[in-house]
Image (cartoon, grey):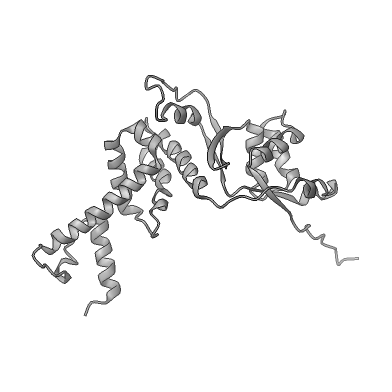
C-alpha cells in the first residue's frame, strides 16, 4: 500500500524532472495515456514558472535573449521549484544559480544583473516603511552613540558589484537606445534600491556611504559603522551622509543596544 505522502512525492518528482514512470500506474487514464496526462500538468507548471521568472528579470531577458533565458530557467526549475502558493518568490535563488553556472565565463556578470533585479522585485512588494524620528534621534546623548544601531527600510536593499550595473540597467530599459554599449570594466557599482512614493529608485552611493549603510544596518553601532566608512573613504562625513541617507528613505528606524557589561575581577 503506497502512502499519500509517497504518492505526492512521486507526483512532485514527475512534475519537476519529467519522469512519470513511478506515478503513472496510479493515474486513471480516462481516455488519455497516464504519462501524457502527467506531462500536460508538468508542462503547465513549468510554463507558469518560466513566465513568472521572465516577468521578474526583464533586463536579463533583454540582455541574454528570451531563448537563453528560458533555457537557464528550465535548468533552474527542477533545482528550485516554487515552495509557495505565491509565484512571485520563484526568482529568489536565481542569481545564486547563475553565479554557479556562469562563474569565470564571459557572462558571469549576468548573476549580478539578476541580483539587482531580484532586489528590485523584493523592494516592490516589501512592507510599508516607517519614518525615522529625527527629534528622538537627536535626543540621544553622544556618549551612547556606541550603542546606537540604525535599521534599514524594509523597502530598501543594497547591491554591490564589480560591474557598472546601473549603466547596464538603464541601457536595457524599454525604449532605451539599442545601440548603447556598456563597458563591463567601466567601474564597480554600489547601489541603493529603494521604494519611494510608490515607485522604485536606484541610486549609486559613494563608497563611504555604502559601507556605512551596510555596517550600520547590519548590527554595527554608528561609531563602528563610521570607522568602517572612513577606512573605505577617508573623506566620508557622517554629518553629510546621515541626513542624505534619511532623505533617500534608506534609514527608517534605530534602536539602542544594551551596553556590554563590565566584568569585575574576583581576585584581590
Q: Where is residue 20 in the image (x, y as percent from the top left)?
A: 18, 61
Q: Which of 180 and 4 is in front in this view?
A: 180
Q: Quadrant of the N terminus?
A: bottom left
Q: Which of 25 and 86 is in front in this view?
A: 86
Q: Where is residue 112 in the image (x, y as percent from the top left)?
A: 45, 37
Rendering quarter of residue 238: top right
Q: Residue at x 17, y 71 (%)?
A: 26
Q: Quadrant of the C terminus?
A: bottom right
Give the farthest residue toward the right. 268
Q: Where is residue 25 in the image (x, y as percent from the top left)?
A: 14, 69
Q: Which residue is drawn at 68% across and 48% down?
A: 131
Q: Which of 265 and 85 is in front in this view?
A: 85
Rendering quarter of residue 247: top right
Measured along the vertical axis of the image, is residue 8 above or below residue 41?
Answer: below
Is 74 left or right of 247, judged from the image as shown? left
Q: Where is residue 202 in the image (x, y as percent from the top left)?
A: 54, 35
Measured along the vertical axis of the image, is residue 20 above or below residue 218?
Answer: below
Q: Residue at x 36, y 31 (%)?
A: 63
Is 196 left or right of 75, judged from the image as shown? right
Amino acid at each position: 500500500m503506497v502512502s499519500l505522502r509517497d504518492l505526492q512525492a512521486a507526483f512532485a518528482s514527475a512534475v519537476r524532472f519529467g519522469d512519470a514512470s513511478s506515478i503513472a500506474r496510479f493515474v486513471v487514464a480516462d481516455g488519455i495515456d497516464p504519462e501524457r496526462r502527467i506531462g500536460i500538468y508538468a508542462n503547465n507548471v513549468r510554463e507558469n514558472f518560466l513566465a513568472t521568472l521572465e516577468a521578474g528579470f526583464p533586463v536579463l531577458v533583454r540582455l541574454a535573449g528570451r531563448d537563453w533565458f528560458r533555457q537557464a530557467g528550465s535548468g533552474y526549475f527542477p533545482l528550485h521549484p516554487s515552495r509557495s502558493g505565491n509565484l512571485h518568490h520563484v526568482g529568489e535563488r536565481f542569481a545564486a544559480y547563475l553565479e554557479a553556472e556562469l562563474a569565470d565565463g564571459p557572462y558571469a556578470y549576468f548573476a549580478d544583473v539578476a541580483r539587482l533585479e531580484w532586489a528590485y522585485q523584493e523592494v516592490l512588494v516589501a512592507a510599508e516603511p516607517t519614518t525615522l524620528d529625527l527629534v528622538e534621534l537627536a535626543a540621544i546623548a553622544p556618549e551612547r552613540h556606541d550603542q546606537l544601531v540604525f535599521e534599514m527600510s524594509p523597502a530598501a536593499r543594497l547591491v554591490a558589484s564589480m560591474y557598472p550595473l546601473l549603466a547596464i540597467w538603464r541601457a536595457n530599459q524599454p525604449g532605451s537606445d539599442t545601440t548603447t554599449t556598456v563597458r563591463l570594466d567601466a567601474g564597480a557599482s554600489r547601489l541603493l534600491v529603494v521604494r519611494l512614493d510608490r515607485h522604485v529608485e536606484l541610486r549609486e552611493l559613494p563608497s563611504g556611504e555604502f559601507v556605512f549603510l551596510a555596517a550600520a544596518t547590519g548590527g554595527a553601532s554608528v561609531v563602528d559603522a563610521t570607522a568602517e566608512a572612513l577606512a573605505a573613504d577617508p573623506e566620508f562625513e557622517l554629518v553629510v551622509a546621515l541626513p542624505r541617507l534619511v532623505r533617500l528613505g534608506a534609514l527608517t528606524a534605530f534602536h539602542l543596544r544594551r551596553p556590554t557589561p563590565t566584568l569585575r575581577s574576583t581576585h584581590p
